[in-house]
Amino acid sequence: MSSILTKRSSHTPPLCGAGLGLRSVHYQTILETLPNVNWFEALTDNYMGSGGLPLHYLEQISEHYPITLHGVGLSLGSLDPLNTDYIQKLKQLIQRFQPRLVSDHLCWSSIDGIHGNDLFPMPYTEEALKHIVERIKQVQDALGQRILIENVSSYVTYQSDEMTEWTFLAEVVKQADCDLLCDVNNIYVSAQNHQFDPLVYLRALPHERIKEIHLAGYEDEGSHLLDTHGDVVHPPVWKLYEQAIEMIGPVATLIEWDTNIPTFSTLQQEAKKAALILEQFDAAA
Amino acid sequence: MQLREVQGLFMDAMYRESISTEKFIKHSPKRSADECLASYRGSVRGGLLKALQDIYPVMNKLLGEHAFEGLSRKYITSNPSRSSNIAEYSSYLSELNDSFADFIESFTPLKNYHYMADVARLEWSWHEVFNEADNTPLNLEQLGLMAPEQHLKLKFKRPHASRLLRSPWPIHQIWTFNQNSPSANDQNESVSLINGDYYLLVWRQGYEMRIDSLSNIEWGFLHQLERSTCFSHAIEQFLQSHPNENISELFYSVISQGWIVDFN
């Protein structure tokens, strides 16, 4: 695995600046106007088909922009067997599009063949830690490259929890030798829902392993925050993002927007805000 | 509590209502354990409902949003997702016989709307074909280099991105009629539900999605080509039920329509 990583990193400049989540409603706009965007993140699972328009568009867009692949289907924390068909298709996508980064989540989604098609948080126990570390290693070996693991937003904590989420995540990254996709919005949402200090979370992460940051919008439901990816990034998340960048240094940052998808120019405005913060700390460094 | 038990209890709670949530979930400062878990239940079911709405827009229109949602929610609670890819939700698993179309067929409130299940089958075919593997056009030059007697040993194939459908209901007309907004359709225009035999090919020509109406002869010929191991066997079988058909003309016709794209 390490030889592949070294080979790639010696030829490809690291991903930087602000990128945008690639959504099908924007394919035409992107190809017709070739907007000034640093990179696009494609949702892996949308390109798992054997052919057709989605792959055709991704092919064209990847000719103009760096691409990252972000998945929701690995179900790394599940006790079900790893989905070898999914991993094989992911490998084919990696070979075809040469993404700068490949990521999935610190979560589980299925048990006994029944799927939730959602990102369920792990119980933070020694047993779960050992299990997910082993699975991440298996996936990395199968893909021949390191992947990024993203922290999910959560609405529950388990009776069986033995450690904090940030301790668990830091251990996963260390033991599995993977990289980290730090979703600042998810940290903020979970911090509000479970009443912890998001800065304690951020400080505990292995900063050198954070290769990408996600930002998105949430909805305030009164009793809790819901991570909908359907709005602009809210002010407290921008503030936490600034604190994160100050702590970690400039890291490639993605604006995610999955529901109520706005015009492309709205996405660009959000990306511009992130870029300004990145430039500010880049200049200071 | 072990990981297996936690995951089992959690998933049970996604598709069933009554579960002892406090046994494995903590309450939050503002919400009970059950309220916390309900966020996921709502998200799982909402995600699957959205998937059904995306795959079956005509069914949604025929039933109306409210009734479609009611039907979908009943389907979801009795048919949990069995794929990591939500776009595969409601696909047909032969061992379970649990496709959305099968569910509609056995759904008592729709027992007098016999055409509904076949409309759902048409929409599922469209959805599958959209993401199927691309095909290159038939290599006629390579075919032309072969002696005619060699053709008889070949197996001719339809595009990967194609599905043959047959229904006693005019599902193509129903589907086409419901592509327009109600205001775009003439108020006097309607689809006559004349019982008969309707033969369709749902397919993709390049990136263009198509639904072609076929004659029973064309449908039968394509169906036989699919079932047979080689061309001579297909001809033999087909002529048993259609002894007066001119195979050369028929073969030329299906090739020129783009319905045959490969052979081996």
Image (spheres, coloured by chain):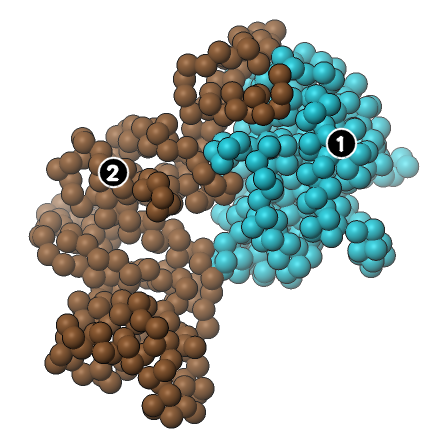
Q: Tell me whether marks 2 and 1 sit on the same chain.
A: no
The C terminus of chain B sits in image quarter: bottom left
Density class for disc 2 (Cα within 10 Å; few <14, some 14-19, many ≥20) is many
Q: Secondary structure at mark 1?
A: helix
Give the percent coordinates (x, y) of residue B17: 41, 17
Name the residue carrying label 2: B104
Name the residue carrying label 1: A172
For the point 38% across and 51% down, which residue is it?
Answer: B127
Q: Chain of mark 2?
A: B
**Chain B in the picture: what colour?**
brown
For the point 41% across and 77% down, which residue is it?
Answer: B263
- Residue A239 visible in the shown view: no
The quarter holding residue A246 reads top right
Give the percent coordinates (x, y) of residue A84: 59, 48
Say which chain is cyan: A
The quarter holding residue A166 reads top right
Callout 2–callout 1 Cβ contact below 8 Å: no
As rendered, which of A131 and A43 lies closer to the eye?
A: A131
Q: Chain of mark 1?
A: A
Please indicate whether residue B89 sits to the left or right of residue B254 in the image: right
Distance from disc 2 to disc 1, alpha carbons, whole Å, reads 45 Å
